[in-house]
Image (cartoon, helix red, strand yellow):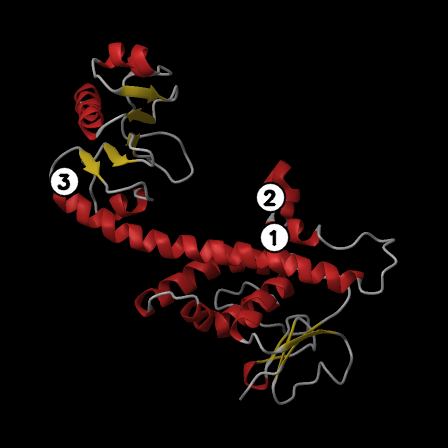
Amino acid sequence: MSITHLVTHNGGFHADELLSSVVLTRLFPMAELIRTRSAQWIEPGCGRIIYDVGRDYDAERGIFDHHQKDAPLRDDGQPFSSFGLVWRHYGRDYLRLSGIPEGDIADIHASFDRDFVLPIDLLDNGALSPSVAGPLSGLTLPMLLESLKPVFDDPAQDADDRAFNWALVIARAFVEASIARKASRRRAAGIVRDAIVQAGEGRVLELPQGMPYRKAVIASGADHLLFVVHPRDGGDWALNGIRLEDDGFALRADLPTSWAGLTDHALEEAAGVSGAKFCHNARFIAVADSRDAIMEMARIAVAEAE
């Protein structure tokens, strides 16, 4: 069936129908997006998808609302918003259209649902309060998107629609960036796994360029690795520590204390390495002007850590 119309409610908008629109307008670019509460439009019909309005959820009839009594729930009992319902049924097709390899679609679909979609669903249903973000509560994605609504005394008749279309562009950028990042991490994981094999029992992992590496290191059980080196744009090389936790700063091993905060000649003297250029004061990264120099710094860092 050819989809000719995408129908959601008019007036003030929220993150769930905005993000649903991101997915649906990508899949059905020729369909007309209609924002209305007119009964003739929010009744399921041939060629239309209705979402966040209509008080029904029936994928076969093309309606995806969550405001009705006995609203749809996930298998674990958590609520869906329209975004979660649309992602559930159309997310895999969206990923295919985005160029995600078929073998990665199931994992990225589930990961995006867990990390991006579910928080939107919970916030939209009042099952999660923005206050959990503390001082950053006003900077959550739903709050930022809703801040793009027109001010209350904007006299323009089309103010809500203009604001919705503007917010749609911004929402699309966040969705596309998140998915692109997840796909890139999967590509990086393959490169890191190969590099771990090459490293053998060595303490230093050499990568062909900067990329996410921690999760692949953990998944590979490469507990012996202490540092990562890779070339940087411009010809320099970096020496990085490996964090113990995703959201922490503690490392498996710090760079030498005597290097902290030094640059150029001072660092060359402290490290005894010609070409040493910089070491962060927190000792999680150092930079040198060549591979030879960074590998020598890595050797020294390993020796001190051991």
Percent position of residue 186, x then y: 32, 55
Spatial CA distance of label 2 from label 1 is 8 Å
Q: Which of 292 and 297 is in front in this view?
A: 292
Q: Residue 96 carries which label?
A: none
Rendered view: 298 above or below 190: above
Q: How many marks?
A: 3
Q: Which mark is residue 199?
A: 3
Q: On the image, numbered disc 2 is attached to which residue?
A: 132
Answer with left or right where residue 292 lies relative to residue 59: left
* Secondary structure beneath label 3: helix
- Give the residue type at disc 2: Val
Q: On the image, numbered disc 1 is attached to which residue?
A: 128
User: In which quadrant will I find the C terminus?
Assistant: top left
* Secondary structure beneath label 2: helix
Q: Are marks 3 and 2 in contact (CB under 8 Å)?
A: no
* Secondary structure beneath label 1: loop
Q: Nearer the viewer, mark 1 or mark 3?
A: 3
- Give the residue type at disc 1: Leu
Mark 2, Cα crowd under 10 Å, few <14 / some 14-19 / many 20+, is: few
Percent position of residue 40, x then y: 75, 85
Q: Which of 251 and 68 is in front in this view?
A: 251
Percent position of residue 57, x then y: 61, 78
